[in-house]
Structures are given as structure tokens and as C-alpha cells.
Amino acid sequence: MPVKVIDLFCGAGGISLGLKNAGCEIVYANEIDKQFCETYSKNHSGVFVDNRDINSLDIKKEFKKYKGIDILTGGPPCQGFSQKGKRLGLKDERNYLFKKFLEVVTECMPNIIIMENVPNLITSENGYFYREIENYLQKLGYCINSQILDASNYGVPQKRKRAFIIANRINKSISFPDQETKIITVEDAISDLPILKSGEGNLFTNYNKKPQSKYQKNRREYSSGIYNHIATKHSKNALYKLSFVPPLGDKNDIPLNLRTRSLHSGTWSRINPKKPARTITTRFDTPSSGQFTLNYQDRCLTVREAARIQSFPDNFIFYGNKTSQMKQVGNAVPPVLAEKIGKKIIEVY
């Protein structure tokens, strides 16, 4: 029997895809954003995707049929956890979605829980918030293991640190996957994709190069071509600024009179193809939003390039408008990392 999973706050379905590839079966997913749901449902056939606001659900009524489910996973927003000096934790109303997640835990009593969130969930206030969650789950009979994982250590071409909590009530010791020695670079991830100028590209493009790495070959499996590879049309002003930035250059190469202040790290920097990318965020199409400009093309990443860096396969198509697609990619758990976590769980389950 496959290991059955509920995925709350599922987004486009990065963690669902990874767990599915590990051998799990997703039986229910919940996501409030309609465009996210369209992407999820079209890429996860047979899964019931509930597009209702979780706050509107009668938790007892909706989840009683899932009592004793194998795995409950999700990454509920918890804005209050990141506010230094505010020792409110689960009492903070900004964390109501996290409390909804815990309500589902209480109703379903899953055998295993996987939570993903920003590192602040564990580190803020000297671990106060994490201990509050730990105490809540321990009272329900769970033992907890947590770790901050950098996706680049697990076969993902991206420096992306996230907190993961694995809780179980089956009296098993569940460890996290071992770090890998081989680092996947941006070049390993996207060098086979067609070169584009600002504003060029199509929803679907045929492959015009052979895969140049094992990583690319794996992303291409089961795909007939390239989807979502459309470059943002940058303004003349942005292109003029980029003309001053050499390969591996940054904002310091732009003349002083053209520079603007930005709070984002890596603004106007070109990506180093020989290293993993920096964290993919939800505005990777904008030079001023971070290190998202290619080193050999005067443009930022396309949705497909960002999806490759997030470890999505090429046959995973993103739907909705471009702003939504970028959020879907930027908010996702890298499927390759999720798969490796899933396999470690299944080893002992």
C-alpha cells in the first residue's frame, strides 16, 4: 500500500511532486490561490485539490475521514514568528494559519508530520517559537526532529535554506537525508535551454540542444519540449544599465548617476554559472530584485529557467499569469529535496 499524504498550503505542488516521486500517494491538497490550484491540478492528476480558504473549513467535518493518515505536510505562513521581541508565538493572531495546520494535526493525528518554513521558525527568539510548536506536538504524543537544510547540499542548483520539522508518533527515529558531495551549478541546470533576448520566447519550444549534464537529462525525462520559457521584456533603461555589467559583474559596474538604492541582496548582479544560484524568490524577472540576471544574456531568468533551478521537471507546466507563475516557482519546496526527505521517511516507516 502506498504511503498516503495530505498537503496543506500546497502551492503549485513542489513537495507533493517530491513525495510522489518517493513513492507516496497524495490524497488531498488545499490551496487558497485559484491560479496555484490550476497548476497543481493539471500536474497532479487524480488528486483532489480543495480551493477553499482553510479558515472557512469545518476541520472536524472535513478531515475526520483522514484520521490516522500516513503523512500530513505543509508550510503554513507564520508572520508573527519572524518578529523579534514579540514573544507571542501561537498566541499571535498573525499565525492563525499555522494554528489551522495544528488543528488539522489534532483532528487527523497523522503518523508523520513534515513542516517546511523559513529558518526564523527555528532560530528566532533563541528558539522560543520552535519550542512552543515542539511542546504542542509532544503533548499529542509526537517526537520531533528539526533541521535547517540548504537545498544546494541535496542535488538542487540553488543556495536555499529552509527549516524542516519532521514529527512522528510511531516511535521511530527519522533522520534527514545525508548531504551530497557533488554540487549542481546553474550551468548544469540551464545551459541547454534556448538563448533568448529580452521579450523573446514562447509557451512551448522544441529542444535545440542535447542535454549537457545528467541533471538536464533528468529534467527532460517524459517531456516533449520546453514550456514557460519566455523572457521578460525589460525597459530600455534597464537594458542600458545591464550593458555596463560584465559577466560576473554587479551594480558597482553601473555608473554612479544611474544607480538606484535597493534593499535586495545581489541587485543587478549577474549569475555565476559555475555555482548554485542564490535563493529563487517570487520576482526573479527583475534585475533590481536580486542576482537573477544571466551572465551571458541581458535579461533575467524565465519561469522555466527558475523552475529548473528549483528542480522541477520540464513536463511540469505552470499556469496563470506571469506574476502568479513566478510566485508558484519562488514559493515552492524543491521537488528533488522533498523526494529525498520522503525516501528517508519511507525507509523507516
Image (tube, grey):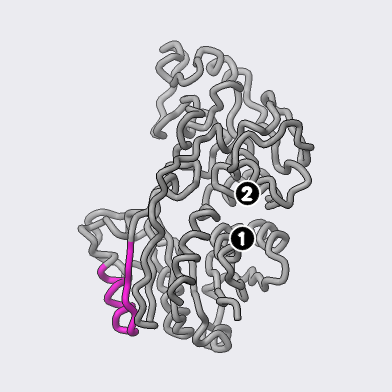
Quarter of the rendering containing residue 236:
top right
Q: Which residues are magenta?
A: 131-146
**Residue 320 visible in the snapshot:** no
User: In which quadrant will I find the N terminus?
Assistant: bottom right
Label 1's element? loop
Task: Return the mark for residue 324.
Answer: 2
Taking the spot 52% from the left edge, 28% from the top edge, the residue there is 287
Taking the spot 61% from the left edge, 31% from the top edge, the residue there is 191
Task: Return the mark for residue 33.
Answer: 1
On the image, the x and y values in percent for residue 338 come to 50, 59
On the image, the x and y values in percent for residue 204 come to 78, 41
Tell me which numbered mark, 2 or 1, is placed earlier along the sequence.
1
Contact (CB < 8 A) between labels 2 and 1? Answer: yes
Residue type at mark 1: give it.
Asp
Taking the spot 60% from the left edge, 61% from the top edge, the residue there is 17
Marks 2 and 1 sit apart, C-alpha to C-alpha, by 9 Å
Q: Is residue 93 above or below residue 338?
A: below
